[in-house]
Amino acid sequence: MTRTIVGVLRGGTSGEYGLSLKTGAAFLQALQEERYDARDIFIDKSGMWHLRGQPVTPARALSQVDVALNALHGGVGEDGTVQRILERLGTRYSGSRGAASGLALNKVRAREVLQRAGIRMPRGASFTINNGLTTADMARAVFEQFGPPYVVKPTTEGAGRGVRIALHVIDLPDAIGDVLDAHGAVLVEEYVRGEEVSVGIVENFRNENLYVLPPAHVRREGYHLAPEHHESGTLTYGVPSPFSHVRKLSLADIARRSHQALGLSHFSRADIILAPSGLYLLEMNAIPGFYPGSSFPQMLEAVGSSVTEFLEHAIGLATARGK
């Protein structure tokens, strides 16, 4: 039996480098050896590609690969850079196309598209370091729209990186300044209190065009999901969740509509707040995590599936889409 050669891309240039290594390791472990010849394609923090421990060009790394699994969280893995490389080299790959993935990664642009599609999100305001405003001016502009507490975040980072919480408006200028200094752009959102939920989407799975996995109820302490929550593997999820059937249908609906609005492909994960006033989408993830403790594997397990079955399905989707 001829095995399919699968390249697993992991590492990368973003702050989620460590999580990407773990997701990639989970992929490599889950690929069945009798069916797949798995190749570990490592991209270091400078952007250099490696195969079998040696620096190589992307063309060399992918020269014999039938299908690529993109396990690169954030940065070049999600902003469209790697997808364009794969397409230029004629390599089939799983996940969203570059434009859609880059749109989902950019929190400001994604908000515009999602809100036009009728998706409810926390109120927000964005600024760049080139706005010509002082951080006090920015804070004043935000306060005129909505009150504290505030979530202050980079516009293109994930896994809680760079997020600040401003409990009072007096704290807001410094929080904005910290994020602008580090990232050059900032999104300030109202802090919506409620239950945090992750909802996974898989396309063309189990005879459904957009199969929605059971929602995962996030359990943690603190104001927001911080990097240490993800990296330590200490996050816990309630799957099955305690929500009513009607509430689960509402969660599934917002996940589906958001996936479609952003033009995502193959799979995604919606992060949602279930507040007393209703559901609020926080963001869509084009490349969900599969590192230890992450929600997607647990959602798969809840429906009797597994990472192995998911990867087989993702490889099939990539092959069907073509180059």
Image (cartoon, rainbow, N blue to C red):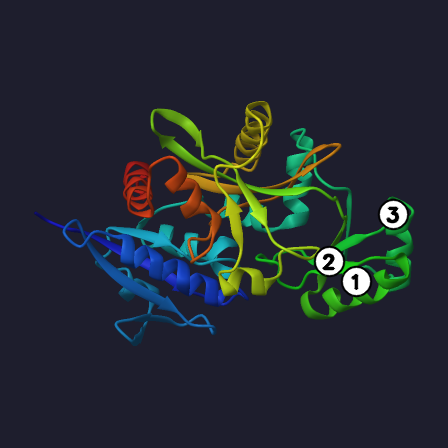
Q: Which mark is residue 176?
A: 1
Q: What residue is rendered at 65% in x and 30% in y?
A: 117
Label located before the other in sequence (2 or 3)? 3
Q: What percent of the width, then of the height, locates residue 29?
A: 28, 58
Q: What residue is rendered at 41% in x and 26% in y?
A: 209
- What amino acid type is highlighted by mark number 2? Val
- In the picture, which quadrant includes the C terminus? top left
> Is disc 1 in contact with disc 3, using a CB cutoff of under 8 Å?
no
Q: Residue furthest bottom?
A: 54
> Is disc 2 in contact with disc 3, using a CB cutoff of under 8 Å?
no
Mark 1 and mark 3: span between their CA atoms?
15 Å
Assign a secondary structure to mark 1. helix
Assign a secondary structure to mark 3. loop
Q: What percent of the width, then of the height, locates residue 137?
A: 91, 59
Assign a secondary structure to mark 2. strand
* Residue count near mark 2 (Cα–Cα under 10 Å), binned few <14, some 14–19, many ≥20: many
Q: Nearer the viewer, residue 125 or 28?
A: 28
Q: What residue is rendered at 25% in x and 72% in y?
A: 52
> Is disc 1 in contact with disc 2, using a CB cutoff of under 8 Å?
yes
Q: Nearer the viewer, mark 2 or mark 3?
A: 3
- What amino acid type is highlighted by mark number 1? Ile
Using the image, determine if residue 207 lies above or below residue 193.
Answer: above
Q: Which residue is mark 2?
A: 186
Q: Which residue is mark 3?
A: 147
Q: Nearer the viewer, mark 1 or mark 3?
A: 3
